[in-house]
Image (spheres, helix red, strand yellow):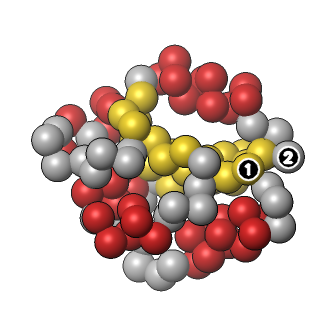
Amino acid sequence: MSILFVVSRLQNTPTVFRTAERSARAGVKVMILFTEGGCRHAIDRKLVTSLSYAEGLFCLEPDSLGLRGKIDSAVRPIDYGGWIELVEACDRIVSWA
């Protein structure tokens, strides 16, 4: 099974990331997509490193234009077509605002 966590705003608590990590520990393939204000997480090296349990880290490119050159290399920028591919590839989607 696979879950796509869509994080659309900057998180003040680690709840979504702990939930994703628990899923990964249970054998679920975890993907994380940052959109909108959540894209700011993609420049936080410490956070990105802590998300190493995820099989894929992504950032919606149109939402992260102001962050070009700052996004951690472990986070792959994708366009809307890439987002659709992630949705189609994952069994479940969790939207976290």
**Disc 1 marks which amino acid?**
Lys
Residue 40 higher or lower than 61, as above or below:
below
Which residue is at a point 83% across and 67% down the rendered structure image? 26
Q: Is residue 77 left or right of residue 4?
A: left
User: Dot 2 lies on which element?
Assistant: loop
**Residue 42: where, in percent of width, then height?**
33, 54
**Closer to us: 19 or 24:** 24
Residue 62 higher or lower than 32, as above or below:
above
Which residue is at a point 65% across and 69% down the rendered structure image? 21
**Closer to us: 40 or 89:** 89
The residue indicated by pointer 1 is 29
Where, by quadrant of the figure, is residue 44 drawn?
A: bottom left
Q: Which one is earlier in the sequence, the residue at label 1 or at label 2?
A: 2
- Mark 1, Cα crowd under 10 Å, few <14 / some 14-19 / many 20+, is some
**Residue occupying the far bottom of the picture:** 13
**Disc 2 marks which amino acid?**
Met
**Are the residues flagged by discs 1 and 2 in contact, CB closer than 8 Å?**
yes
CA separation, marks 1 and 2? 6 Å
**Closer to us: 51 or 65:** 51
**Residue 52: where, in percent of width, then height?**
51, 61
Question: Can residue 12 be seen here?
Answer: yes
The residue indicated by pointer 2 is 1
Which residue is at a point 16% across and 39% down the rendered structure image? 68
